[in-house]
Amino acid sequence: MEDCIFCRIARGELPCHKVYEDDKVIAFEDISPVSEGHTLVVPKQHAENLFEISAEDLTAVHLAGQKIVRAIRKALDPVGVAVLQLNGRGVNQIVMHYHVHLIPRAAGGPALPVSDWGAQEGDPEALAGTAGKIAAVM
Ligand SMILES: [Zn+2]
């Protein structure tokens, strides 16, 4: 994609604070970090989201993500790392090129909004109904 910002970063046309690169994947610091070490893992081949990405690129991104999360653990010693991936403008995907967020939380750092959503137990009948709807179209 000609004007896609992540495609341009992958082609070296725009700068980034690079953490990792191989033939299929590039990873760099998010320019609007939620916390220190907030890193994006991006396939070099354009795909908008999880609905579109190839199995090969999906695998490459997540295997690279595991290497990077281990490096984040060594370098920054966080108390945990949230892994987040958004699909669609309705859930605030801003750059429409598949990417995985690795978001560490430092010891004593503020709670991460992405992992502190006040989960409450759901209604078993509603859960069964939803599971049935999804499973029926798999
Ligand atoms: Zn792109």
Image: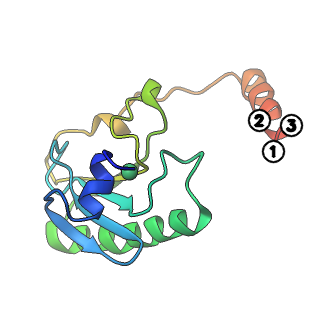
Single out the residue that lies furthest toward the front.
Answer: 2
Look at 17% across and 53% down and name the residue there: 106
Badge 2 vs badge 1, beta-carbon distance below 8 Å: yes
Where residue 123 sits in the image (x, y, percent)?
A: 68, 21
Residue 136: assigned label = 3
x then y, percent, for residue 81: 31, 56
Q: Tell me, yes or no, whether the two marked residues, 3 and 1, touch with CB atoms within 8 Å.
A: yes
Q: Is residue 98 left or right of residue 125?
A: left
Q: Residue lying farthest right?
A: 136
- The alpha-carbon separation of the residues under discs 3 and 1 comes to 6 Å
Instruction: Please give left or right for residue 31 compared with residue 131 in the image.
Output: left
Badge 3 local density, few (<14 within 10 Å), some, or many (20+)? few
- Left or right: residue 81 versus residue 91 is left
Q: Nearer the viewer, residue 34 or 127?
A: 34
Residue occupied by mark 1:
138
Residue type at numbered disc 3: Ala
Q: Which residue is mark 2?
A: 134
Q: Which of the 4 image quadrants contains residue 8?
A: bottom left
What residue appears at the point 21 percent right and 69 percent down from the top-left corner?
Answer: 19
Question: Mark 3 to mark 2: distance in Å?
Answer: 5 Å
The answer to the question of whether label 3 and label 2 lie on touching residues, with beta carbons closer than 8 A, is yes
User: Quick one: SS at disc 2?
Assistant: helix
Label 3 residue SS: helix
Dot 2 alpha-carbon crowd within 10 angstroms: few under 14, some 14 to 19, many 20 or more: few
Cα distance between the residues tagged 2 and 1: 7 Å
